[in-house]
Image (cartoon, rainbow, N blue to C red):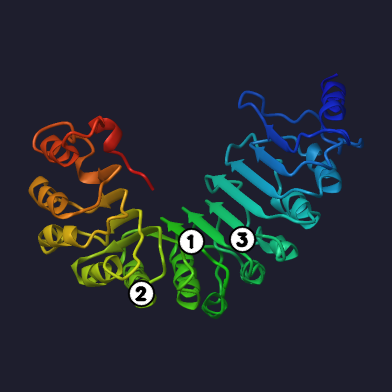
Amino acid sequence: MTLTVYHALCQIFFDGRSNIHSLSLDRPGRQKTPLMDKPLEMDLQVRNIKDLSIRYTTDAFLFDALHKQTVNIENLTVIKSSDSGLRNFDDQQFLSSLIFSQHKLRRFELTCYGSVNGFTSNVLTPLASQSDTLVSLKLHGIPFPSECSISALTICTNVEELEIRRCTNGPGCNITSIQAAELPNLRKIRVVESSILWGTLMDTVISKNPVDLEEVFYQPWEDEEHNTLSTSIIQSIAQWRPKLRTFGISLSSDEVPFLEEILTSPGCKIENLSLFSLGSPECGMEKIWPELGHHMPVTLKHLNIWIFICAKSMDQFLQNTKATLDSLYVDAWVEDFLCHPYSDVLTRHLKDRPIDLSDFFHPEI
């Protein structure tokens, strides 16, 4: 009965005259068993779907129909849980087939929460079939690609946006393959709390395409290997001076001169700046803030700081900057920003602007 209703709804909403182009498949958490075990041998009327989102589904029978009938997807989002009751989502059999069957996939977002029953390191291999059209790739919780997958990724030279979040190392990849990567059309790249291999890939593609970047965001785990990458990335940005709108980087006092060079370069239009600590707190960092305030571009709207800074230093920083901030976040203040002396600093900066402190003090990244 459920399948009959489902099929009828598909025919009503997704026939040839339909203007509906978006479909979201979601399995409620309380129902962890599939509706049926065999493929669905019927026309779902989903050829016009351009936006497809698959979240936590257990119904593997849908995928056989989807990869045969849904061939015009432009935006594909897949979220997989490590829940033991949601094991039927097989990336090799179903997701690969779905990607291969597309005519013009433009944006692909893949998320896996937890490592159990997760995706394999070959999951990106089918992307080679979409190299002419793919412009955006976002990954969360995915192991670093295998040799064939990293090759598939680098074939996608039209990629403009690459976002990596909390992605681990895979079974291993030749560093030569990573260093050969080149994404000439890249405009935005983010790597957040991911393995050293992802950081190396980021450093590589930035060094080969430094001038057209609009967004560079690197928030690594705190260890010495990532420290070296942070230094390399900020040096590349300082040297080539792309017209960044968003910039996030980890730094110590040694990298501050590079940051100042970036912020004071002609045409700097950074609107969103995020600064992360490279490791244990440095005594020297406390001294840099007042002077650094002088170097903030007037275009800056959002400032996020994950480096310890006392109220006095931040007060001097804000007095010296000419930027009118729409938001400010200092991670070390998060529990006390409504209390003295932090609230005094924020209030002084806002002056007569009608903004509540709770609306002003938040991360905007």
Quadrant of the rendering where the N terminus is positioned: top right
Q: Position of residue 339 (x, y in %)?
A: 13, 32
Q: Is residue 186 above or below residue 176?
A: above
Q: Is residue 280 above or below residue 363?
A: below
Tag nearer the camera, 1 or 3: 1
Looking at marks 2 and 3 on the same chain, the residue that comes earlier in the sequence is marked by 3
Q: Write down the residue under mark 2.
A: 232
Q: Position of residue 60 (x, y in %)?
A: 77, 39
Q: Position of residue 41 (x, y in %)?
A: 92, 37
Q: Write down the residue under mark 1.
A: 189
Say which amino acid is labelled 1: Ile
Distance between the alpha carbons at the discs numbered 1 and 3: 21 Å
Is the residue marked by circle 2 packed among few (<14), some (14-19), or many (20+) residues within 10 Å? some
Distance between the alpha carbons at the discs numbered 1 and 2: 15 Å
Distance between the alpha carbons at the discs numbered 2 and 3: 27 Å
Residue 121 is tagged as 3
Residue 104 or residue 299, whichever sits in front:
299
Q: Quadrant of residue 12?
A: top right
